[in-house]
Image: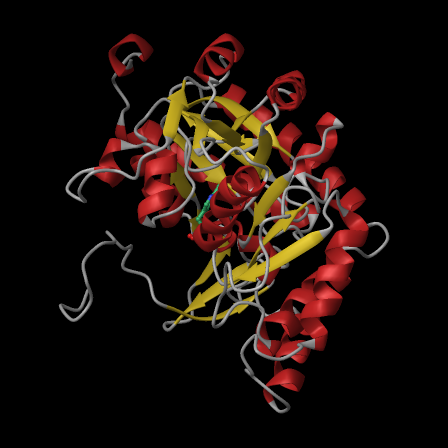
Amino acid sequence: MVAALLPTYARADLRFVRGEGPRLFTENGEVYLDCTAGIAVNALGHAHPHLVNALKDQAEKLWHTSNLFRIPDQERFAERLVARTFADRVFMTNSGAEAIECALKMARKHHAVSGRPERYRFVTFEGAFHGRTLATIAAGGQSKYLEGFGPPMEGFDQVPFGDHDRVQAAIGPETAAILIEPIQGEGGIRPVPREGLRGLRELADEHGLLLILDEIQCGVGRTGHLFAHEAAGIEPDIMAIAKGIGGGFPVGACLATENAAKGMTAGTHGTTFGGNPLAMAVGNAVLDVVLEEGFLQRVRDAARHARQKLARLVDEHPLVLKGIRGEGLMLALECVVPNAEFIAAARDARLLLVPAGDNVVRFLPPLTISDEDLDLAVEKLSAACGELEDAMAGTTPEAVK
Ligand SMILES: *Cc1c(COP(=O)(O)O)cnc(C)c1O
């Protein structure tokens, strides 16, 4: 890696020059099957023709005007999200962290304008990830991201994942909202059970709190529902989205009910780039595809296919893998070996995966992947297992543990 870059990433030594659907091509013409989808960003794969055309058309017309003026495609994008979700109001951002920042500010402002300015605290969960800004690392609460960056921002009360009683105990007179990912992404693909989400909704209602969902990774069709919380039959007050909604163009948004958003009046918040014409051309193009009749059903079918094949793979390779979890095409393989070794072996088989907490590897193919390519991915995973098993030949299962 060049010294000119801030070395905050331990990058794989791979340089891609082209992508097509679930495939990435290196400068030497090597082909990789991409089951990272840019960390759940390239929801429609690489170089999707509809997205490419939308971007090209818009590039020749108008890129940016600022939010001083009306942006027709932004209005359309917001109206489409409002029509399809719990939300009445949408604020555009360029990233997930900014969408969460908006959500946090909005929740505090909501209580402030409701005559309860003392309510500024958030109940959050261990293993959470909400971004890299100072507020969002405080919300995530992970020491590896907080260390050395000064006193963490005040106002986050973190409770163990999946512990309803501890949530209840953490709620006090200063609590403004509960913030949770319906499926923890970086934390290791840990889904909140449906009754857990319903329980949080009830607690929020009972105590006059707002429920904020971080669907930055699990939203936009990834679970086979447009948004993951739909499966639980609940609605949040505020929701942050990003990643998949831009299909690779930086787009994020904070969605809210009219009530939750009531304090966010003219001048209280803003963004220079958020929702500019170029971003909104792509955002609308992503919605065109994802909202098409049958798209989400296809994701659910692909997910069922992938899950069956992966379950068999896990059964066949107990020295390497021990389980599978997740929902839709947001899946994880639980590793026996260190997850970094599994990812390296998969890379040798020309398959790309993402690590996550709790020693899992994330399997996040584009939502458009075919059954044939899912089968190919499983073959490559099987080859990776074989490579690792050969390397440990002679060791017994006990010794591996
Ligand atoms: C990626 C992610 C974020 C942060 O998004 P950025 O665009 O990197 O700022 C926040 N929350 C979740 C759940 C994420 O997966």
Relative vertical location of residue 395 with respect to residue 105 in this rendering, above or below: above
Counting from the top left corner in percent of width and height, residue 321 is at: 43, 24
Counting from the top left corner in percent of width and height, residue 152 is at: 26, 38
Q: Quadrant of the N terminus?
A: bottom left
Residue farthest along the right direction in this orientation: 293
Residue farthest along the bottom direction in this orientation: 60
- Left or right of 178? Residue 347 is left
State how many labels appear: 0
Relative vertical location of residue 215 with respect to residue 320 in this rendering, above or below: below
Q: In the image, what residue occupies the spot 77% across and 59% down?
A: 80
Q: Quadrant of the C terminus?
A: top left
Q: 395 or 69: which is nearer to us?
A: 69
Counting from the top left corner in percent of width and height, residue 210 is at: 59, 32
Relative vertical location of residue 14 with respect to residue 258 in this rendering, above or below: below
Display colour scheme: secondary structure
Q: In the image, what residue occupies the spot 46% across and 55% down?
A: 98
Counting from the top left corner in percent of width and height, residue 242 is at: 55, 54
One can see residue 304 in this view: no
Q: In the image, what residue occupies the spot 51% across and 12% down?
A: 168
Residue farthest along the front direction in this orientation: 115
Q: 254 or 44: which is nearer to us?
A: 254
- Left or right of 89? Residue 242 is left
One can see residue 57 in this view: yes
